[in-house]
Image (spheres, rainbow, N blue to C red):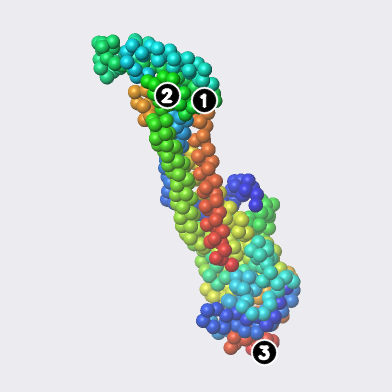
Amino acid sequence: MIELENVGYSYGGGELLSDVSVTLPPGSFHFLTGPSGSGKTTLLKLCYGALVPTAGRLCAFGKDMRTLDRDQMALLRRRIGVVHQDCQFLDHLKLAENIALPLVVSGRDTATEAGNLDELMQWVGLAARTDALPPELSGGERQRAALARAVIMSPDVVLADEPTGNVDWEMSQRLMQLLVELNRMGKTVLIATHDLGLIRATKSQVQTRVLRISNRRLQHAGADL
Amino acid sequence: MNIGALLLRDKQADRVVPPTGYTAHLTLFVSGAMAFLAVFAMALSLASGRLADRWAEELARSATLRITAPADQRAAQTEAALAILKQTPGVARARALSDEEQAALLAPWFGQDLPLDALPVPRLIEVVAAEPGYDAAGLRLRLAAEVPGAVLDDHTRWRAPLVDAANSLRRLALISILLIAGAMAAMITLAANAALAANAQVIGVLRLVGARDRYIAGAFVRRFTLRALIGAAVGMVLGMVGVMLLPEASDEGGFLTGLGFRGLAWGLPLLIPLLGAIVAFAATWAAARRRLGELS
């Protein structure tokens, strides 16, 4: 699905990531971990094209990211669902409209997808909040809403950046449950988190691989933590 | 890029950009004010153009031959001059003014009771040129030889500066129209940039969920184009009313009256809202593309 070959990323001041090589095969479940500021978010951004690698090659769905123009990048984003730590919504639109936003911008008819939307809202436990505005939502609700928005286009890959960062343990368990379910449905999942307890708790439910960033390099931590 | 499809109202796309309060009103006001000014600039340009044409044509077609000669020779020289004019190709009509007519011409300056006989008033011959006109230089030479007291005045002296003035006025009016369009483009670019900056988060979210640039830009472009169109239409109507209220063209008012539109020209201001919309479209489109280019 997503392949990184000796990818490096430097910004003005220096090198953040170097020589990162990893392949996310279809249906895999990866955790990305490492200390704060080690480049977890940067690596995720590289994966969905928000940043362009300064070295190496990054392929998504068999296409070199560097060769994609802006429209092709937009089409790529429809196949990659992203959940941010501080998920942003369109604050003037109701929750249901926010979750359906990817459908709207890709020109799909939301009326025919209304059933799917209801089901999805049910699945993330927000069925009662469809008419709420995003600023009225709690942290956990926002995270679940972001997850629902990320998967409404039925993407092949779901990237989540600290999806449990702002929520309590119980809610984070619930979110992980949803991500595990997505993985069981065949989605490729990559989650950046610094919460090792969460990784341990998830490992019992699904076969995961752990990638650790340390010293600008990516290590395949495998099963041992 | 299919402009028609882009401008087509897309309710859902329009909703993704939050409604904006005062920038919307500013855009409406600016387009209205600019359209209002454009109507006047257009009226001025058309009127000065008309004036230049009229002066050039009317004054070019008529000339005056003045016979200044001792009283006893005046009639003979007038006859000779008329004979020459009759033979000159390009002269449609030549007619000596009667004493009464000359008295009427002089009356404003000397009063009604002028004893014309007592004064050495030259005889005037009105010459109306045909199409194409006569060769003034050739005529002058011939007159100088045969009618020593004749002076041909083809009004060039008067005409040239007047026509120049009217033409410069028209040029100024056209430049004003261009400046108005430029100022409107600049202001709409500023307004669009402000709107784009204020909605940076919205744009970021849209980009994240896979919206194409065209979709995002379209939502803004539609809005500004529509506002400019409505604003300019209102300004244009007000401007037209203003022009309609100007006094009618009259001889007393000279060139200051008759500034309005004539006939089909009343349709020209209808182009202003259209041009305003095109300017707004281009300005917003460029601003949106520039902004989006900075985003990944």
| Residue B133: mark in rendering | 1
Q: What crowding class fits label 2: few (fewer than 14 Cα within 10 Å), some (14-19), or many (20 or more)? A: some
B117 on left or right of A125: left
Q: Is residue B157 visible?
A: yes
Instruction: Tell me whether marks 3 and 2 sit on the same chain.
Output: no
| Residue A38: mark in rendering | none
Secondary element at tag 3: loop
- Asked if the residue under mark 2 is in contact with the one under mark 3, i.e. CB atoms within 8 Å, the reply is no
Query: Between marks 3 and 2, how big is the CA–CA gap?
Result: 121 Å
Task: Tell me which chain the residue with mark 1 is part of.
Answer: B
Task: Identify residue type, mark 2.
Answer: Ala
Residue B205 location in percent, x, y?
Answer: 56, 63
Secondary element at tag 2: helix
Q: Is residue A194 above or below residue B110?
A: below
Q: Is residue B115 above or below residue A35?
A: above
Q: Nearer the viewer, residue B213 or A167?
A: B213
Residue that mark 2 sits on:
B144
